[in-house]
Amino acid sequence: MSFDKEKVLQLCNEWSKNTLMQTLDIEYIDAGEGFLTAKMPVNSRVHQPMGLLHGGATVALAESVGSAASLMFINTEKQEVRGIEISANHLKSKRDGVVFCTAKIIHQGRSLHLWEIKITDEQDKLISLCKLTNMILPRR
């Protein structure tokens, strides 16, 4: 079976409707073998009180992209993804513009997926670095 980038992006964006991803305006924009990328606008909707990108919004972006990326490796009719651990290091602040989030697979096991997730700005400067562990479960 060959990788269908357009199908992956369409499915990820469709699955985001009526969810936190839609609330945060997360849009999936690129995919390939072992990675998924999305973008999110930085504006007052995702600011903390000091007018900066909220760390929680950043982590929500990272977990959304990493979880969606795991869907590329499973049979969604028989399996489900659950994020079981996420860590984040916020390295740079951001007030406005757009951030890009790319999840790259580190370990793809039958029951666990480990992702490295980088959130960058428009100049490809690192904003946050995250690590996400997903558990793959049978669909109930």
Image: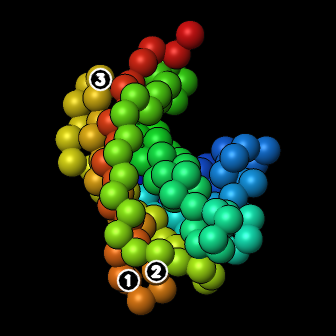
Disc 3 to disc 1, how far (Cα)? 32 Å
User: Which secondary structure lies at badge 1?
Assistant: loop
Residue closer to the observer: 127 or 15: 127
Dot 3 corresponds to which residue?
Answer: 111
Disc 2 to disc 3, how far (Cα)? 32 Å
Q: Going by the image, does 73 lie left or right of 68?
A: left
User: Residue at the bottom extreme?
Assistant: 123
Residue 84 lies in quadrant: top left
- Three-letter code for the amino acid on which mark 1 is drawn: Asp
- Across and down, in percent, residue 127 comes to 40, 72
**Residue density around tag 3, few if under 14, some if 14–19, many if 20 or more, within 10 Å:** few
* Residue visible at 47% across and 42% down in the picture: 67
Does 96 sit above or below residue 118? below
Rendered image: mark on residue 121: 2
- Across and down, in percent, residue 2 comes to 37, 53
Dot 1 corresponds to which residue?
Answer: 124
Total number of numbered discs in the rendering: 3
Q: Going by the image, does 14 lie left or right of 34?
A: right
**Residue density around tag 1, few if under 14, some if 14–19, many if 20 or more, within 10 Å:** few
Q: What colour scheme does the image use? A: rainbow
- Three-letter code for the amino acid on which mark 2 is drawn: Asp
Does 45 sit above or below residue 61? below
- Ranked by sequence position, the earlier of labels 2 and 3 is 3
- Three-letter code for the amino acid on which mark 3 is drawn: Ser
User: Residue at the right extreme?
Assistant: 18
Disc 1 to disc 2, how far (Cα)? 5 Å
* Residue 40 seen in the figure: no
**Residue density around tag 2, few if under 14, some if 14–19, many if 20 or more, within 10 Å:** many
Q: Going by the image, does 43 lie left or right of 35?
A: right
* Residue visible at 35% across and 75% down in the picture: 126
**Quadrant assignment for the C terminus:** top right
